[in-house]
Amino acid sequence: MLLFSCCLLLAPLTASALAMNDAISIAGQQRMLSQRMVKAYALVGQHTMLSAVKQMDDTIRQFDRNLEQLVPFAETPKEKKVIGKISRLWFAYRLLVKTEPNLQQAPQVNAIADKMLKYSNRFVTLLEERSGTSKGRLINISDRQRMLSQRIAKFYVFKAWGLDTDEYSAEYDKAVKEFSDALETLKKAPENTPEINEALDKVQTDWNTFKISFRIRGGKFIPSLVTRSLDNILKQMDRITAMYVAIY
């Protein structure tokens, strides 16, 4: 498992120092963290990866730090309303995950996390609208790829845990398609630098590899291999997101 710290490229900023592009990227990272923590929860519950406990702890701490920066950055009434909903959901989620992870509780944990994802996505959209530029859109799309990598991993780990419902399977397929489509959009962006294009080509190569590696081998799931593959893609999308922020 890649160290989670490798994925966190954004250094803590005070509210007064937070620029719009940084705020969009941090808010977008919250979408990823909402999915990553459920994936870690499921891994802890299966007792299959020793690093899952640390990943869960690191994810919770990072979500806390990000939220502390975003709450005072909210400016419009709509932004303040949405960040308030995220804060309330986060309070409920933290109480829930204090208990030992178990299969029966996992759907409830996932439901709260997906609500945080919904409102985090809404908050990103509101910030993008306030920024009023195409650069916000590219940062948003790149950020969202980080979330999708962890959402795909989450549903795969759920399958390995026995949570293989029609709804989860449909959401898994949807996330895979959305990642592929967004990757094509980023590759065609005229704002791309040669360095960004090279990095996106590497993501494409690893994404093609993932689409082979996620297949069930001999009727058995391979969550450790699949999550490592998707965490590698997450790390690369972190770097690409930082490059989009830096070129403007």
Image (cartoon, grey):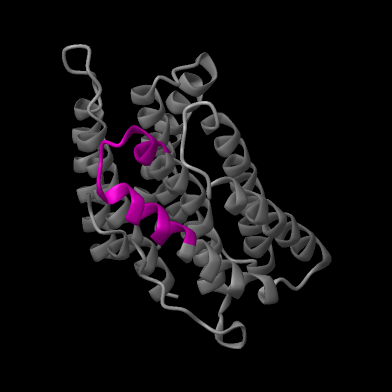
Q: Residue at x 46, y 51 (%)?
A: 32
x%, y% of residue 129?
68, 61
Relative height, residue 168 to residue 34 (above, below): above
x%, y% of residue 30?
52, 57
Can the viewer see residue 247 in this picture? no
Q: Nearer the viewer, residue 73 or 67?
A: 67
State which quadrant residue 164 falls in: top left
Is 247 covered by the magenta stretch? no
Secondary structure mostly seen in magenta is: helix
Is 54 covered by the magenta stretch? yes
Task: Give the left or right position of residue 182, taking residue 118 as reference.
Answer: left
Relative height, residue 205 to residue 132 (above, below): above
Q: Residue furthest front?
A: 100
Q: Which residues are magenta?
A: 42-60
Q: Quadrant of the C terminus?
A: bottom left
Q: Residue at x 54, y 19 (%)?
A: 167
Task: Give the left or right position of residue 6, taking residue 35 as reference.
Answer: left
Can the viewer see residue 81 in this picture? yes
Q: Residue furthest right?
A: 77
x%, y% of residue 173?
43, 24
Q: Residue at x 63, y 69 (%)?
A: 131
Q: Nearer the viewer, residue 161 or 167?
A: 161
Q: Residue at x 53, y 50 (%)?
A: 98
Task: Give the left or right position of residue 133, taking residue 43 as reference.
Answer: right
x%, y% of residue 174?
48, 27
